[in-house]
Image: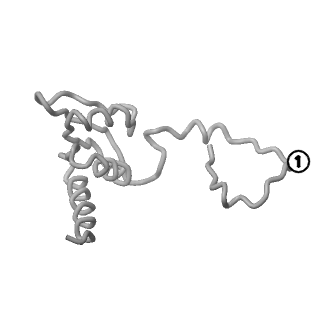
Amino acid sequence: MRTFVISRIRKAEMLPDIFSPDMKIIRSVTIDDIVAWKKYANVKIRLTPEARKFAVACRMHTKQRIRKDDENTWIFTIPEVPEQVVVPWILSQQGEAVPLEPPEIVEAVKKAASALLGKLEC
């Protein structure tokens, strides 16, 4: 699939050439390996009931799991995921998702949140 910004298209025309996609390449791309970023293993995130709804809907890995931790929280475990995918997701939950492991992901979330706080006028 390709997406285009309509306002940037200046002209469209039919050409006699036919594009044949390489099905081997297409079949090789999965949700578990869509980009070549470094992946972190065993990412664990504590979720509130509200964040749990979004974790159920958000597929970051085919083998991700959510288990009940206590009465009001769940543990979301992702077998492997890039920082560039999981950190923005955690931040988008507005405090309803707290990273637990690995330390590199916890630090990346702290760094991103601190960078934003440092740019806000208080």
Within-10-Å neighbours for mark 1: few <14, some 14–19, many 20+ = few
Q: In terms of secondary structure, where does tag 1 sit?
A: loop
Q: How many marks?
A: 1
The residue wearing badge 1 is 16
Q: Residue 25 at what x, y percent from top left?
A: 61, 42
Q: Quadrant of the N terminus?
A: top right
Q: Residue at x 26, y 58 (%)?
A: 108
- Residue 100 coordinates in the image, percent (x, y): 18, 46
Q: Is residue 44 left or right of residue 84?
A: left
**Above or below, comparing residue 107 to residue 48 in the picture:** below
Seen from the viewer's position, the closer of residues 71 and 102 is: 71
- Image quarter of the C terminus: bottom left
Q: Quadrant of residue 115?
A: bottom left
Q: Amino acid at mark 1?
A: Pro
- Between 42 and 15, the residue placed more toward the observer is 15
* Residue at 29% in and 30% down: 65
Question: In the image, is 58 to the left or to the right of 65?
Answer: right
- The residue lying furthest to the left in this view is 70
Q: Which picture quadrant has residue 64? A: top left
Q: Residue furthest right?
A: 16
- In the rendered image, the vertical position of residue 93 relative to residue 112, given as above or below: above
Q: Residue at x 33, y 42 (%)?
A: 80
What residue is drawn where x is 63% and y is 55%?
Answer: 5
The spot of residue 49 in percent (x, y) is 21, 33
Establish if 81 lies above or below 50: below
